[in-house]
DNA sequence: CCCGTGCAAATTGTCAACACTTTTTACGTT
DNA sequence: AACGTAAAAAGTGTTGACAATTTGCACGGG
């Protein structure tokens, strides 16, 4: 048989279903902010926009509800979840131990090549930090975190970690997340790298857990400061 | 308006939808073993059995896919997930730090009444253990774990923890999970309780994390022993 | 006897229509 | 003008039907 060369869109449909493709698209719309927290998802409107019917839309929304990005109220509709500061802090707590575990597991199995790769990420962030280049910093930071979680060798851990990170995107004040300065964060990255390079699981756990826990503290500090100004 | 007294089944439908009710029912069927791992979920058959149509069934299955109890293959159907020993061990790793966090958080907020309640659970298990009464032991053990996770004051943590426990039910050899004896487990429970009662977060984290980690080790030991006998 | 081919049954994927609920709008009363 | 009420519009919940794909099975060739 002659192998066909379908469009990339159709290629996706071969391994997943239409509902899954819709789920990814809606998730993208939510995480990018196109769908604002609290906003209702209009099934008819979305179906028309994506050139499909309501059936697959409802399946996709149901899946998103399970991942916590959407809440459904019977006979009322599905709404983009609104994340309170308390919930955001809760998520940080859970995320911190998961990231700690990722560091611990990575320390036990890391290769020299992976250490080198991590070093490049950290060095790149330090460079961006010195130049106050936030645009360059952000993707590198994301890449380092993804790299650590993916390299830990525990897909369950990676799935739950990613789920938490996605949920955090719903937090209205997520632009504040980097509040507290890049220099402090870089220092923590250095300690993480050192612990991994030393292949010390306990030290790596603490360094990674602490990194997220400190980020939580920084967020809390910013929110508190904001609250005092506003109220 | 006169409040109606609908059947319990309909009462559920008021707060959730038919798809959610179906999701719960199918989840129950899976966790109870009525649906065996690897088995396909026949949409028509299930719809007829539950007196509904395929629409809500598909929504429910889609949600279960998100929680990892079901895997869907396009044009083939949805299957009860089969959990390998490697995946089970992965889950234990994640569960251990989550339970550790639960213990840590509980130690920081526990009331005297809660300490007393925990003590009763532990005492009950010790009693059941002495009598080798597994039937009495199991629900008490479950209750203690649920109590700890629910009392930690972090719903995100509780949700993810429960999701992991449900997934572990898919493991074919879950009957082996208690392998290693109840006495050892009770000793760990005592240490957990002592750490909570002392309101020592660090000690509580270690005691709780260790409890699940040891359970993982015991499972691993049993599986290894079994493997040697078989192969 | 084994294997591939092709038809038939079963099953999933998708859609459009209908029933029911909620929300909005218009209207009349106070 | 404000409020309550009722009709109309909009939207969700559910169903049955049709299309497309996969699976099971009989048949015939090697």
Image (cartoon, coloured by chain):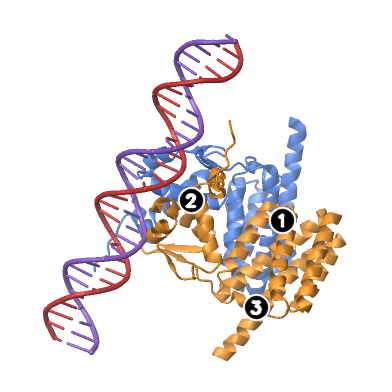
Chain colours: A orange, B blue, C red, D purple
Label 2: which secondary element: helix
Please report whichever mark, 2 or 3, sits nearer to the chain's N-terminal start.
2
Give the spatial CA distance, label 2 vs label 1: 26 Å
Eyeballing the image, is A210 above or below B52? below
Q: Are marks 2 and 3 in contact (CB under 8 Å)?
A: no
Q: Is residue B192 visible?
A: no
Crowding at mark 3 (Cα within 10 Å: few <14, some 14-19, many 20+):
many
Q: Which residue is mark 2?
A: A19
- Residue A38 in percent (x, y) is at 46, 71
User: In which quadrant will I find the N terminus of chain A?
Assistant: top right
Pinpoint the chain carrying mark 1. Answer: A
Q: What residue is rendered at 59% in x and 86% in y?
A: A226
Please report whichever mark, 1 or 3, sits nearer to the chain's N-terminal start.
1
Q: What residue is rendered at 72% in x and 50% in y?
A: B216
- Left or right of A47, for residue B64: right
Comparing labels 2 and 3, the label whose residue is closer to the camera: 2
Crowding at mark 1 (Cα within 10 Å: few <14, some 14-19, many 20+):
some
Comparing labels 2 and 1, the label whose residue is closer to the camera: 2
| Circle number at residue A150 | 1
């Amino acid at each position: 048989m002659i192998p066909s060369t379908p469009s990339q869109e159709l290629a996706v449909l071969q391994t997943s279903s239409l509902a899954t493709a819709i789920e990814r698209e809606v998730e993208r719309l939510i995480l990018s902010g196109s769908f604002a927290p609290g906003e209702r998802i209009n099934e008819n409107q979305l179906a028309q926009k994506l050139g499909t019917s309501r059936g697959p839309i409802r399946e996709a929304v149901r899946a998103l509800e399970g991942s916590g990005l959407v809440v459904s109220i019977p006979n009322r509709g599905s709404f983009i979840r609104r994340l309170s500061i308390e919930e955001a802090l809760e998520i940080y707590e859970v995320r911190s131990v998961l990231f700690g575990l990722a560091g611990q597991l990575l320390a036990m199995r890391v290769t020299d090549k992976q250490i080198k790769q991590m070093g490049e990420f950290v060095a790149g962030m330090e460079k961006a930090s010195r130049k106050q280049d936030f645009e360059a910093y952000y993707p590198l930071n994301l890449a380092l975190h993804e790299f650590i979680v993916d390299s830990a060798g525990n897909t369950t851990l990676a799935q739950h970690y990613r789920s938490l990170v996605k949920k955090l995107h719903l937090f209205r004040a997520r632009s504040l997340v980097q509040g507290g300065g890049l220099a402090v964060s870089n220092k923590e990255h250095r300690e993480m790298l050192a612990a991994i390079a030393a292949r010390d699981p306990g030290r790596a756990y603490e360094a990674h857990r602490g990194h997220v826990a400190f980020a939580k503290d920084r967020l809390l500090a910013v929110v508190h400061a904001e609250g005092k100004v506003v109220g």
